[in-house]
Image: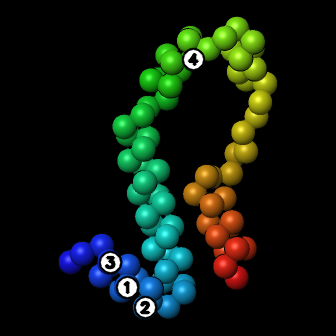
Amino acid sequence: MTLQEIQNQALQLPIDDRWRLVQSLLSSIQKETLVFSPLATNVSSLTGLSSWTQSLIGVVQLDTEEPTESYVDYLEEKYS
């Protein structure tokens, strides 16, 4: 089955099923990304930053909300 055929089948699904598919795909991508780029690798790359940039580490707070949930919320608002 080609990618185009999969996309066409997905577009024929009811909207609730398509949202579940989006959530499942985003979750899968997030898990795969975490496996291939662990936090330890990212921390070691911080040493190459300028001292001014390093001084910002820990100052800027990220949202505690799941990135997947934020993106799904964004998509729901955009296409509702």
Q: Secondary structure at mark 2?
A: loop
Disc 4, disc 1: CB below 8 Å? Answer: no
Name the residue beneath numbered marker 2. Answer: 12
Q: Position of residue 55 (x, y in %)?
A: 75, 14
Picture quadrant of residue 10: bottom left
Q: Secondary structure at mark 4?
A: helix
Tell me which residue sits at (42%, 49%) in the image: 31
Disc 1, disc 3: CB below 8 Å? Answer: yes
- Which three-letter amino acid code belongs to the residue tagged 2? Gln
Residue 46 tag number: 4
Circle nearer the N terminus (2, 4): 2
Circle nearer the N terminus (4, 1): 1
Total labels drawn: 4
- Residue placed most toward the observer, 41 or 51: 51
Residue 4 tag number: 3
Residue 8 tag number: 1
- Which three-letter amino acid code belongs to the residue tagged 1? Asn
Q: Is residue 63 left or right of residue 30?
A: right
- Which three-letter amino acid code belongs to the residue tagged 3? Gln
Tell me which residue sits at (36%, 86%) in the image: 9
Q: Secondary structure at mark 1?
A: helix
Tell me which residue sits at (29%, 82%) in the image: 5
- Which three-letter amino acid code belongs to the residue tagged 4? Leu
Circle nearer the N terminus (3, 2): 3
Disc 2, disc 1: CB below 8 Å? Answer: yes
Q: Position of residue 51 (x, y in %)?
A: 70, 8
